[in-house]
Amino acid sequence: MVWVYFDSSALVKRYSAEDGTEVVNELFRQLPIEQMSCAVIGILEIISVLVRKRNDGRLTPNLFAQAMIELNKEVVESEGFSVASVDDGLILSALDLITKHNINATDAIILRSCLNLQQVLKGQGSHMIFWSCDKRLLRAAQVEGVTIFDPEVGTKALLEVSLSDS
């Protein structure tokens, strides 16, 4: 079974039209929401992006409100979507990733959370794909042995292949 772990840079495309939105929406059509995950801090980052877009006029108040309703329904309040908690232990275990990969603190926390889930899934015979649009974070994840997908450059055809190969 394949799982997708989202960085906020990829998941935000579900709630605000950007390059890659079409591919993210296609993933939501093809993969059960019960096989999707992100870190709780990623949800805060998504809301921050949506607020910034509302404030600078890229999202109308109505589109912002609709995006928040959808995010709450599909992720925050969903019983199916897996939201990984972030505690002090996770944060401390991410410290080495900052210097090893030259990534920021939030990205290190997200990558460590992703790696932890990958380890659990491997034990269950499942496979995980990390979705992000952050090139540095994608490189770090790949070095750590994680399968990656960038919806800004990935196509629906590549999505099909990634889901069938897993």
Image (cartoon, rainbow, N blue to C red):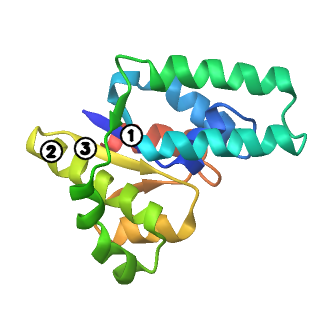
Q: Which mark is residue 33?
A: none
Q: Is residue 92 left or right of residue 81?
A: left
Q: Say few, some or many: other residues with alpha carbon within 10 Å of mark 3 (under 14 / 14 to 19 / 20 or more).
A: many
Residue 126's place in the image compared with 78, above or below, is below
Q: Amino acid at mark 1?
A: Val
- The residue sitting at 54% across, 42% down in the picture is 44
Give whichever of 27, 138 is nearer the camera: 138
Q: Residue at x 49, y 49 (%)?
A: 7
Query: Which is more N-terminal, label 1 or label 2?
Result: 1
- From the viewer's perspective, tell me whether residue 47 is left or right of residue 93: right
Looking at the picture, how far across and down is residue 124, in whole percent?
11, 38
Screen quadrant of the N terminus: top left
Q: Looking at numbered disc 3 in the image, what kind of residue is underneath it?
A: His
The answer for how far apart the CA atoms under marks 2 and 1 are is 13 Å
**Residue beneath disc 2:** 120
Task: Please determine whether, in this image, residue 89 is positioned above or below residue 53.
Answer: below
- Give residue 4's mark: 1
Closer to the eye: label 3 or 2: 2
Residue 127, label in figure: 3
